[in-house]
Image (cartoon, helix red, strand yellow):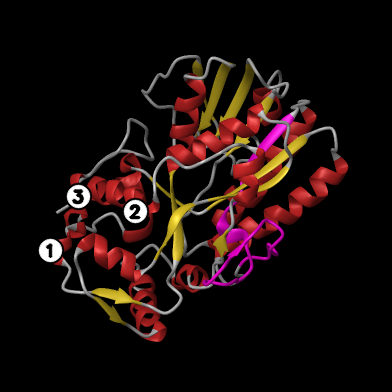
Amino acid sequence: MSSTAGSRVVVTGATGNVGTSVVRLLSEDQQTGSVLGLARRIPDWAPPKTEWSAVDLASDRTDLTSAFRGADAVIHLAWAFQPTHDPARTWRTNVLGSIRVFDAAAAAGVGTLVHASSVGAYSPGPKDRMVDESWPTHGWPDAAYCREKAYLERTLDTFEREHPEIRVVRMRPAFLFKRESASEQRRIFGGRFLPGPLARPELLPFLPDIPGLRVQALHTDDAAEAYRLALRTDVRGPFNLAADPPVDAQLLGGMLNTRPVRMPRTAARSAIAAAWGLRLLPASPHLFDAVLRLPLLDCSRAHEELRWQPTRTATEVLEEFLEGLQQGAGADTAPMRGRKVG
């Protein structure tokens, strides 16, 4: 058991997909003394042992050191996916904001820093076998999300050398879903006006089968449990997090009772690029390029050292998420607000 048992934990990005699961889990954990959730907008949600503070990581006037003082651990989850047409803006929040978090944690004397990295930090890798945490983390440089995640990996390399007294853990999860994140993720990746009911299988005449489109998924609550275990276990370094089985067109076709039809990468990318260029689709073609190249994750280290196991299969995760899309599911925070369009 680490020194963070019964402690004060600060969570950045506490009202988003991962943040709501982490805060809820910590607020119910008898070994947690108190939780401070940091977010740009304070929610009406009031879980036990939790207080809130309004913080904008993009602002260099934000006093994070005061917010972190007295905390035993900081879990850094805050991240801005948009605007994808303005990478300088996401860089200010994601990279410069994260560096402020790291520096403030050191200045405040925080003992444990758990950082939300991602499968997106990894360099292109295989789709027919899984890689462990030693795989290079240089990202796909053309995609802002991957570029920023990879840059922060290098930043933490330096941070760990300069602050060996701080226990740094890097979580590298696969794609994270839960029912309550459906509306938020539809807005982030599909756009505000994409109707959630279009997720109904009977409306899909076929399913595009794109070469390289084979990824992993994980329930957000299972990822949150890994974060909790990282506080309670004396570990350092990176951990891959994913559930089985890997997700491809064949698995989705079976779930949706829809026939996969082979589609060339160039055709799919051209359609995404056109929609993104017309600002009809928030997800960029550069992120699509990255997804086709992401490696599959070997999670043996998390299983062995954290004693972590996902409680839901990737199939169950996607079934829950699709149901949430159809119903406009959400949660009682600004980023997670439910909305059904169409």
Q: Residue 202 carries which label?
A: 1
Q: Is mark 1 on a helix, strand or loop?
A: helix
Looking at the rendered image, the quarter that the C terminus falls into is bottom left
Q: How many labels does the image show?
A: 3
Q: Which of marks 2 and 1 is nearer the N terminus?
A: 1
Label 1, residues with CA under 10 Å away: few <14, some 14-19, many ≥20: few
134 within the magenta span: yes
Which residue is at the front of the view, 133 or 190?
133
| Figure quadrant of residue 167 | top right
Q: Which mark is residue 315?
A: 2
Q: What residue type is labelled 2?
A: Thr
Pointer 3 residue: 326
Range covered by the magenta-colored residues:
112-139
Q: What element carries label 2?
A: helix
Residue at (73% x, 31% y) in the render: 234
Which one is in front in this view, the residue at disc 3 or the one at disc 1?
1
Residue 15 visible at all: yes
Residue 63 visible at all: no
Which one is in front in this view, the residue at disc 3 or the one at disc 2?
2
Label 3, residues with CA under 10 Å away: few <14, some 14-19, many ≥20: some
Q: Which of marks 3 and 1 is nearer the N terminus?
A: 1
Residue at (74% x, 27% y) in the render: 110
Which residue is at the front of the view, 328 or 97?
328
Is residue 163 rendered to the left or right of residue 194?
A: right
Q: In this view, does 243 lie above or below 49?
A: below
Q: Which mark is residue 181?
A: none
Magenta portion: prevailing SS class = loop
